[in-house]
Image: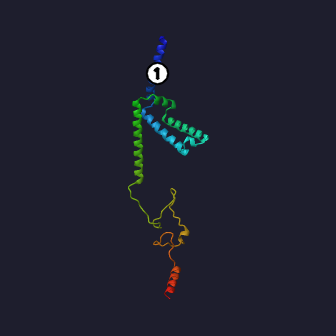
Amino acid sequence: MKTRLSLMLAASSLMLAAPALAEDDGLTPEKVAAIQRDEAAALAKVNADYGNRKPSEMSNAERGQSIRDQQKEAAKVMEKHGVSAKEFATFTARMTPEDNQRVANEARRLDDKAKAEKEAEAKKRKGDGEVHIQQGFSDADPVELESEEGAEPSVDVDSSLENSPVVEMGAPAGVPAKSSISRKKASRSGSRRGR
């Protein structure tokens, strides 16, 4: 009877020490939030590859392949964070309500951080708001469309543009300007009415 009691005490001490061992390995509620965020992003990518369709809208082969792809992506996330799926599942199953609250707080912090980074990137892309508009192409100020590093700048002028018809700026698009022939016909018809 004493051996059973000592074995149970030893087993219970190992069971209670498991969460502490997992934290020593680097698994914390904050890391759990990061893993869950990365895993959700990876699964969203796989779902987008399959057109964000419900499993009931897929064929059996597509459904099976999407599940295998989701498992591969989840395994990559676990490997990236240096945690096995078993350790992750064990740690999350044994988390206390306080740990769950820490995970939720960290998830909110990561969302806010990502949102701030996205806004900063958009602001950086927007620049100072000043836009330079060039009124056309000229030999004095050519515009280079494609270039290679170290190559001399060159401007190709399409020869068909040199012989193209001149378009009057006052006429609306798609409406041809009145020609001198139509004016002559109008003047003749006007002179007949007067007779």
Looking at the picture, which amino acid does disc 1 mark? Leu
Compared with residue 175, is residue 193 higher up or lower down, i.e. above or below?
below
Q: How many marks?
A: 1
Q: Is residue 26 left or right of residue 161?
A: left
Q: Considering the numbered disc 1 on the image, is that residue within a helix, a strand or a loop?
A: helix
**Which residue extends farthest top?**
1
Say which residue label 1 marks.
14
**Which residue extends farthest right?**
61
Compared with residue 37, is residue 95 higher up or lower down, i.e. above or below?
above
**Between 144 and 126, the one nearer to me in the picture:** 126
Residue 111: give x, y in percent of width and height: 42, 41
Residue 28: give x, y in percent of width and height: 43, 32
- Quadrant in which residue 57 is drawn: top right
Residue at (52, 37) in percent of width and height: 74
Compared with residue 123, is residue 58 higher up or lower down, i.e. above or below?
above
**Between 21 and 112, the one nearer to me in the picture:** 112
Residue 93: give x, y in percent of width and height: 46, 29
